[in-house]
């Protein structure tokens, strides 16, 4: 009897299928609109606090420049690391920085989930609003400091590809764009997956940091490391997909499918992260902390 | 024996705090290991075709960067963040009312922090020695040189940080300023590469900055980049820096405190 | 159908037990032990549309936990909650459209944004059309005196200004149900008055159902016709404010004006059982008596027999002292 009842219910929703097929577009459109609005409001703050904006954006800029400068200083004397020139290493560095900037700009609020929002209870406000709490968390604070990373990443990638005289074709351009966007997703997803632990342990920063830190490996050619580390960076904490493999492809050294793997990995990890997020939300609903 | 009696409690306390924040403890370990893995791989690749660069061998350079990673921030000052956080909470005026010398109080607070940081750095140092071929010097003079320049460098850095902190009296943008300052420090302190490998002009300038006084100088003694015979020169530079920065920071503080009391926060 | 219907509502938390010391911390890592704490224990009540109800109890009595279950933040461990016919936890998003919540001191607004921008964001989240938003803003600006605040970022506001801003943000989408957790805590008298006036007006005009927790009895006396009292998770009173006074206000005060200053008191005053002198100054005398043990006339005549009385009055039972009594466990 019960089974029959269920089937009957499904049939009813099937009747509406052609409508609900497109109905998901309405919330999507609404969310995009909302995001744009949140973004514009943040922008107004920057305009009001111009100095803060400049200091914030340039601060990330200077930190990155320090790292780049160190590499330059040494490769000025020794122009070759495991067969990679300075400009080639620069390309890797720029690609990682560019991908990371998306996480820094759009998902920085994740870092504060436990330490700030869950600990002091301000997470509640996301739950009494009629929008998706994760979207709300993301949209709530676009972080302008990330713009500094974005610019420096972009400049470094362009500069190094000019210096390397890369012969661009459609495939290579697509590869670079996908690497940046997919890479951004990988950065965000790994942070989401680790930050969700805040629902259990409140301060998730150590865990997030412990995983996030692995991206520094990807600033250099993976061939520099032992095969264990290389595999880990390809399949487990896949920051290698953000820079190394796409760079190999663009430089014409290798045409492995891994060059195009970052969007797939990014989407997959995002789905995993979102599933974990929902588990965390359920726990929050039963413990309230 | 007396030394042990005096310092054992600190050690026990430190072990306890380490276990209290065990998540942070492990993540710091992990970060150190990651950094050391990258450094080792990078420098081995750099030295693949040469045995010495600018007079430094692979062993010495690796030793330097790894020790810098393990110990380099031990004499850092927390006064800037302290001022920043108290400004954002609006509690700074209250702190200024305390009947002690504000600057001296913080110097002492920081100095206790350095000792704790050294203890806290031990696990990372142990990892560096056991797994990453870092070598501590056999010459006791090198340790002495390290300790003296470590403390003096810490004082130099303290005065500079204190001046940065005073900026917080004028602007509320202390967070961004803090990161900006960290970037500059990373640049000039020699935290990433020994100053010897920098281009001559930059090196000359960098070595005079408080950042290098606090990090490059002590670490270079401990790692063997500099020999203890250079100690006299190093101390002279550090003492001069302390006098200049000490006077400057004192002047700035007197003015900044006036701004604060006039504006009322 | 009642707007809010709560039946046998229960919430238990498992709290991990930590043993002291290093060994304890280590054990807790692998074999955590929990103790159960019942924050809300089988509570039932219902609110009709347009009711304004005060929800009172000491800190930790279970007020906030109840509100969190009503808003859908927490899932009940037992019993059921219906708000406007919905299960607020399961139907969280739909429920959120129809409710407004103020969490005491915590702001739901954006720290750095000017209030007008903050409110516009809120309006967009609740999909309020622009013209409608402008109209409501004007209405609020009047009652809450928001005009001067609209261009101010939240972080520069005083406590009272923040709460006014908060209320505007909570009611801008004209919710059918409003939960207020300590809306007047720490505010001065004038701001309290303004906020109470605003809530009254909203309730009257739109039939908004309001549930508010407060420690300020002024809020209750001015706004609520009905009061729920919760004590260690259990609902110990649900009824009219007036009845509370009758039922729990067993003590009354009586004031006498005497003809002679300090006269006639050479010997101690004889009192009926259950009455006592609370204050005696010059020619005035104050008594407190338990009306279950003796009547007002007994007390009055006893005093009049012993002293020359010019005038006397009986005091109304005072809510503050009743609540104090309840908090102190005087009811069980």
Image (cartoon, coloured by chain):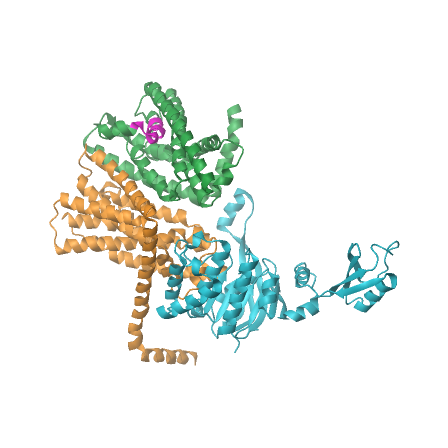
Chain colours: A orange, B green, C cyan
Q: Which residues are magenta?
A: B207-219
Front residue of A186 and C28? A186
Q: In which image quadrant can residue C247 be found?
A: bottom right
Q: Is residue B192 visible?
A: yes
Q: What x and y, as percent, mark residue B218?
A: 36, 27
Front residue of C110 and A10? C110
Residue at the location (26% across, 41% down)? Answer: A225
Residue at the location (47% across, 42% down)? Answer: B264
Q: In which image quadrant can residue A13 be found?
A: bottom left
Q: Is residue C271 left or right of residue C169?
A: right
Q: What x and y, as percent, mark residue A188?
A: 32, 54
Q: Is residue A238 left or right of residue C132?
A: left
The chief SS type of the magenta part is helix
The N terminus of chain A - image quarter? bottom left
Q: What x and y, as percent, mark residue C98?
A: 45, 70
Reply above or below: B214 against B229. below
Q: Is residue B122 visible?
A: no
Find out whether residue B212 is within the magenta segment.
yes
Front residue of B23 and C298? C298
């Amino acid at each position: 009897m019960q089974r029959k009842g269920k089937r009957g219910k499904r049939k009813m929703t099937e009747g509406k299928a052609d409508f609900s097929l497109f109905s998901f577009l309405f919330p999507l459109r609404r969310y995009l609109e909302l995001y744009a609005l949140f973004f514009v409001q943040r922008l107004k703050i920057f305009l009001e606090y111009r100095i803060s904006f400049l200091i914030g954006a340039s601060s990330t800029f200077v930190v990155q420049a320090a790292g780049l400068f160190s590499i330059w200083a040494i490769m000025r004397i020794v122009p070759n690391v495991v067969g990679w020139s300075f400009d080639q290493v620069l390309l890797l560095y720029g690609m990682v920085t560019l991908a990371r900037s998306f996480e820094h700009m759009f998902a920085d609020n994740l870092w504060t989930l436990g330490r700030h929002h869950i600990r002091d209870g301000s997470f509640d406000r996301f739950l009494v609003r009629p929008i998706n709490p994760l979207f709300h968390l993301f949209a709530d604070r676009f972080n302008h400091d990330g713009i500094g990373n974005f610019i420096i990443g972009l400049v470094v990638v362009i500069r190094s590809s000019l210096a390397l005289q890369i012969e661009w074709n459609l495939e290579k351009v697509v590869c670079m764009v996908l690497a940046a966007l997919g890479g951004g997703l990988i950065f965000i997803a790994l942070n989401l997956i680790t930050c969700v632990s805040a629902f259990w342990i409140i301060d998730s920063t150590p865990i997030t940091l412990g995983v996030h830190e692995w991206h520094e490996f990807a600033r250099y050619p993976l061939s520099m490391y032992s095969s264990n580390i290389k595999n880990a960076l390809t399949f487990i904490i896949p920051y290698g997909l953000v820079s190394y493999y796409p760079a190999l492809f663009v430089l014409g050294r290798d045409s492995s499918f891994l060059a195009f793997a970052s969007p797939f990995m990014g989407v997959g990890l995002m789905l995993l992260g979102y599933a974990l997020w929902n588990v965390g939300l359920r726990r929050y609903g039963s413990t309230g902390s | 024996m007396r030394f042990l009696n005096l310092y054992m409690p600190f050690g026990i306390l430190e072990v306890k705090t380490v276990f209290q924040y065990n998540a942070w403890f492990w993540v710091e370990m992990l970060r150190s290991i990651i950094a050391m893995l990258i450094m080792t791989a990078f420098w081995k690749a750099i030295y693949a075709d040469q045995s010495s660069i600018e007079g430094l061998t692979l062993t010495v350079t690796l030793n330097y960067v790894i020790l810098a990673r393990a110990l380099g921030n031990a004499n850092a000052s927390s006064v800037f963040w302290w001022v920043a956080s108290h400004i954002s909470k609006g509690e700074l005026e209250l702190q200024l009312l305390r009947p002690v010398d504000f600057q001296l109080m913080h110097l002492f607070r920081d100095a206790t922090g350095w000792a704790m940081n050294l203890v806290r750095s031990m696990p990372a140092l142990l990892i560096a020695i056991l797994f990453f071929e870092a070598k501590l010097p056999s010459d006791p003079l090198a340790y002495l040189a390290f300790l003296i320049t470590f403390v003096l460098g810490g004082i130099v850095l303290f005065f500079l940080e204190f001046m940065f902190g005073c900026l917080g009296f004028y602007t509320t943008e202390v967070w961004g300023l803090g990161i900006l300052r960290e970037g500059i420090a990373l640049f000039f302190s020699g935290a990433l590469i020994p100053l010897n490998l920098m281009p001559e002009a930059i090196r000359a300038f960098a070595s005079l900055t408080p950042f290098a006084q606090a990090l490059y100088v002590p670490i270079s003694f401990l790692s063997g980049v500099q020999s203890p015979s250079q100690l006299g020169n190093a101390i002279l530079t550090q003492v001069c820096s302390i006098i200049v920065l000490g006077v400057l920071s004192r002047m700035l503080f007197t003015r900044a405190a006036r701004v604060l009391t006039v504006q009322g926060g | 159908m009642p707007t809010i219907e709560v039946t046998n509502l229960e919430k238990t938390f498992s709290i991990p037990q930590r043993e002291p010391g290093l060994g304890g911390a280590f054990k807790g890592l692998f074999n955590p032990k929990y103790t159960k704490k019942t924050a809300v224990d089988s509570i039932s009540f219902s609110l009709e549309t347009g009711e304004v109800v005060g929800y009172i109890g000491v800190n930790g009595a279970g007020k906030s936990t109840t509100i969190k279950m009503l808003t859908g933040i927490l899932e009940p461990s037992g019993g059921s909650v219906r708000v406007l016919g919905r299960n607020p936890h399961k139907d969280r998003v739909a429920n959120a459209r129809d409710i407004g919540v103020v969490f005491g001191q915590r702001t739901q607004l954006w720290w750095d944004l000017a209030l007008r921008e903050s409110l516009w964001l809120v309006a967009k989240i609740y999909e309020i059309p622009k013209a409608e938003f402008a109209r409501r803003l004007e209405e609020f600006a009047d009652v809450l005196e928001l005009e001067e605040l609209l261009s101010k970022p939240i972080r520069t506001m005083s406590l009272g200004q923040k709460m006014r801003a908060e209320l505007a943000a909570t009611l801008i989408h004209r919710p059918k149900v409003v939960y207020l957790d300590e809306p007047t805590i720490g505010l001065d008298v004038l701001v309290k008055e303004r906020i109470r006036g605003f809530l009254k007006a909203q309730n009257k005009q739109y039939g908004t159902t309001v549930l508010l927790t407060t420690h300020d009895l002024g809020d209750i006396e001015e706004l609520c016709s009905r009061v729920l009292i919760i004590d260690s998770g259990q609902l110990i009173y649900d009824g009219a404010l007036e009845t509370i006074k009758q039922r729990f206000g067993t003590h009354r005060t009586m004031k006498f004006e005497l003809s002679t200053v300090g006269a006639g008191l050479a010997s101690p005053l004889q009192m009926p059982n259950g009455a006592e002198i609370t204050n005696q100054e010059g020619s005035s005398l104050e008594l407190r008596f338990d009306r279950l043990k003796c009547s007002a006339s007994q007390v009055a005549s006893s005093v009049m027999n012993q002293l020359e009385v010019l005038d006397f009055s009986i005091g109304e039972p005072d809510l503050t002292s009743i609540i104090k009594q309840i908090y102190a466990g005087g009811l069980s």
